[in-house]
Image (cartoon, rainbow, N blue to C red):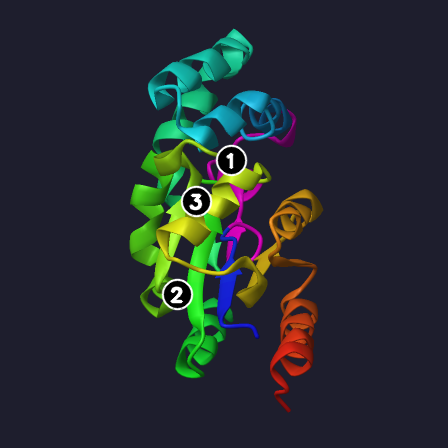
């Protein structure tokens, strides 16, 4: 029987829009591509998500990979752009609310740097419909490492087979499956919602 629904944040509940931020700042497409390559798309960003290395060290390391003539734009992106990187999707709060109102446990499991989550969470209305969360930077674990899924299960005393997890990355959905959670790859709101409801019908006999 399914009792709990677990959601990723970026790409599922919010639009993660670093390219849009750089465009809004007036940075050229060519410069933006380089800055994104050396920051958000860099392996170093995963270490930001992991939280095991101080963020300022990682930010400095990424800056060192940016051509000198673009570093002023990089600095603006990192310092001024942070609050604008995410915009919740219009459906997010109501989606989680309706599951919450139906009596399901609703949880968050996300790869997210600590300082960014601290800035963004105030704008995440959907969080008030959740019963708990595990965010990578705080626990120093990353999806799809099985340990982070177990961290959530243990923290809230959940049974894997009673949970559905939704993530936009296939590897992360598969990571959930590896510990016994029902994993769904998010392709669109409509698709994910239908797959959740289908599982609820199959597992819980819901109509």
Q: Percent from the top left, x then y, of residue 86?
A: 45, 49
- Residue 151 among those drawn in magenta: no
Where is residue 112 drawn, in percent x and y?
44, 40
Residue placed most toward the observer, 182 or 126:
182
- Determine the image quadrant of residue 203: bottom right
- Seen from the viewer's position, the closer of residues 176 and 70 is 176
Label 1, on which residue?
A: 142
Q: Which residues are magenta?
A: 10-30
Horizontal and vertical percent position of residue 98: 46, 80
Which mark sits nearer the N-terminus, 1 or 3?
1
Residue ID for mark 2: 126
- Residue 81 sits in quarter: top left
Q: Secondary structure at mark 2?
A: helix
Give me the C-alpha separation between circle 2 and circle 1.
22 Å
Q: Which mark is in front, 2 or 1?
A: 1
Residue nearest the viewer, comparing 18 with 156: 156
Q: Residue at x 47, y 77 (%)?
A: 99
Location of the C terminus by quadrant is bottom right
**Residue 135 at x, y percent in the picture:** 41, 44
Secondary structure under the numbered disc 1 in the rendered image: loop
């Amino acid at each position: 029987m399914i009792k709990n629904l677990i959601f990723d944040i970026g790409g599922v509940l919010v639009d993660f829009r670093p390219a849009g931020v750089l465009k809004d700042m007036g940075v050229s497409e060519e410069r933006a591509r380089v800055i994104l390559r050396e920051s958000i798309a860099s392996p170093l960003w995963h270490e930001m998500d992991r939280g095991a290395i101080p963020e300022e060290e990682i930010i400095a390391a990424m800056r060192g990979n940016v051509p000198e003539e673009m570093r002023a734009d990089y600095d603006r992106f990192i310092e001024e752009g942070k609050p604008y990187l995410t915009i919740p999707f219009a459906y997010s709060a109501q989606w989680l609310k309706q599951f919450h109102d139906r009596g399901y446990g609703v949880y968050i499991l996300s790869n997210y740097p600590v300082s960014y989550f601290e800035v963004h969470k105030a704008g995440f209305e959907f969080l008030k419909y959740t019963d708990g969360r595990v965010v990578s930077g705080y626990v120093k674990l990353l999806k799809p490492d099985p340990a982070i899924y177990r961290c959530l299960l243990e923290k809230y005393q959940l049974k894997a087979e009673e949970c559905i997890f939704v993530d936009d990355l296939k590897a992360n959905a598969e990571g959930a499956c590896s510990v016994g959670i029902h994993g769904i790859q998010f392709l669109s709101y409509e698709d994910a919602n239908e797959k959740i409801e289908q599982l609820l019908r199959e597992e819980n006999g819901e109509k």
